[in-house]
Amino acid sequence: MIWFYYILITLGVFITMEGITWCTHKYIMHGFGWFLHEDHHQPGYPHVFEKNDAFFVVFAIPSILLFYFGIRPELNFLFFIGLGILFYGIAYFLVHDVLIHRRFKWFKNTNNQYLKGLRKAHKIHHKHLDKPDGECFGMLFVPFKYFKKRQ
Amino acid sequence: MSQYLYLILNLGSISIPLLYSIFEKKFHFIQYFKIAFISILLVAIPFLIWDGLFTINGIWGFNSDYFIGTKFFGMPMEEWLFFFCIPYACLFTHEVLKYYVPNFKLSKSVTVILSFLLIVLVLLLLIFNFGKWYTTLNFSVFLLLMVYSLKYHIKTLQEYYPSFLVILIPFLIVNGILTGSFIEEPVVWYNNDENLGFRIFTIPFEDVFYAFNLLFSIQLVFNYLKKKQLEK
Ligand SMILES: [Zn+2]
Ligand SMILES: [Zn+2]
Ligand SMILES: [Zn+2]
């Protein structure tokens, strides 16, 4: 039975992370953290890494701590919170960095409506080059209009 | 008789692939014999050093009942042969599969997701068992190999995952015998303080990743040399 709760925790954290990321993106990355996020909104990526990648490190720290305390003195729920964050991080990376920004040549020709919708929505987000403007801060969940087939 | 066991396992593994490479005219794997040997040798060097260090330090060892008795640098001759016979059989298996069933591969997205799941699994096991020598070294090599291959050799991964599942069948049999299935004592024993202590039948869980590290590295070198040979 305990495993059922552990799976629920992992899933719950995964979903919650979308909300946390939305807020972080809107109020921190496009707020006082803009100096780190700014280069991500400039067209073209001359370097392997962007300053924006620092946010991956920021989100990795709580995850690592949760793993650390999640097995001390024995396996407990903190571990699965960490796992939820890790899985979200991977999903975010695969969608945002691979699918949308093509930093790796992995999913080139996807025909999936959902993935195409995500791509469209994030492209809209990137239309704005300056900090105060912004829309579509979500990553895995974006307004339904983007999922509709082209009229 | 039992002192021939390890030798027989080696020769048994390589015999059919070798005979088939020589006498089969259509697929004609013998044309790649030289580059196969070079790739196997290049990868065998670091793995033999690793093996030697682990043997000296008692992380694993060999049961003298099952090998002839000739040793080089503390390791039985049969163990040296292992790094040539088994890889040849596996290299051959993958190439045959690729030749006769060219569509036997995973899609790119499935490969990426599967790789990430493996990375998470191995990373977590590594974090919790850091300091156990076999686990630590083996999983670190696996993670490096994985990250490198995801960036530069995704196509090879797509082809290799399904082949590896096929290769795992003889691997489980041969390695099963080596670790003590069907026989009284293991041919190769492991110090359980230096691994996870989790066994598939009698095989340490890490061995699956060890096999992947060894065989996939050879495959990468082989593919590179094969491409060069075909360009000529
Ligand atoms: Zn933004
Ligand atoms: Zn973006
Ligand atoms: Zn953005």
Image: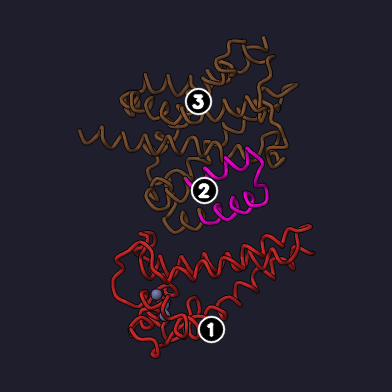
Q: Closer to the camera, A146 or A51?
A: A51
The chain ID associated with circle 2 is B
Q: Secondary structure at mark 2?
A: helix
**Residue kind at label 1, given as amino acid type:** Cys
Does the magenta run of residues contain B65? Answer: no
**Residue kind at label 3, given as amino acid type:** Phe
Reading the image, the residue beneath label 1 is: A23
Reading the image, the residue beneath label 3 is: B83
Which color has been applied to chain A in this rendered view? red
Q: Quadrant of the N terminus of chain B?
A: top right
Residue drawn at x 42%, y 87% is A135
The x, y position of residue B210, in whole percent, is 56, 37
Q: Residue furthest bottom?
A: A132
Residue B167 versus residue B125 in the image, above or below: above
Reading the image, the residue beneath label 2 is: B143
The chain ID associated with circle 1 is A
Q: Quadrant of residue A63?
A: bottom right
Badge 2 density bin: few <14, some 14–19, many ≥20, Cα 10 Å = some
Q: Secondary structure at mark 3?
A: helix
Q: Is residue B75 visible?
A: yes
In the image, which is nearer the foreground, mark 2 or mark 3? 2
Spatial distance from mark 2 to mark 3, Cα to Cα? 22 Å
The chain ID associated with circle 3 is B
Residue stretch rendered in magenta on the structure: B116-144
Residue drawn at x 46%, y 65% is A94
Does the magenta run of residues contain B129? Answer: yes
Residue drawn at x 75%, y 21% is B184
Q: Secondary structure at mark 1?
A: helix
Q: Closer to the camera, B170 or B118?
A: B118
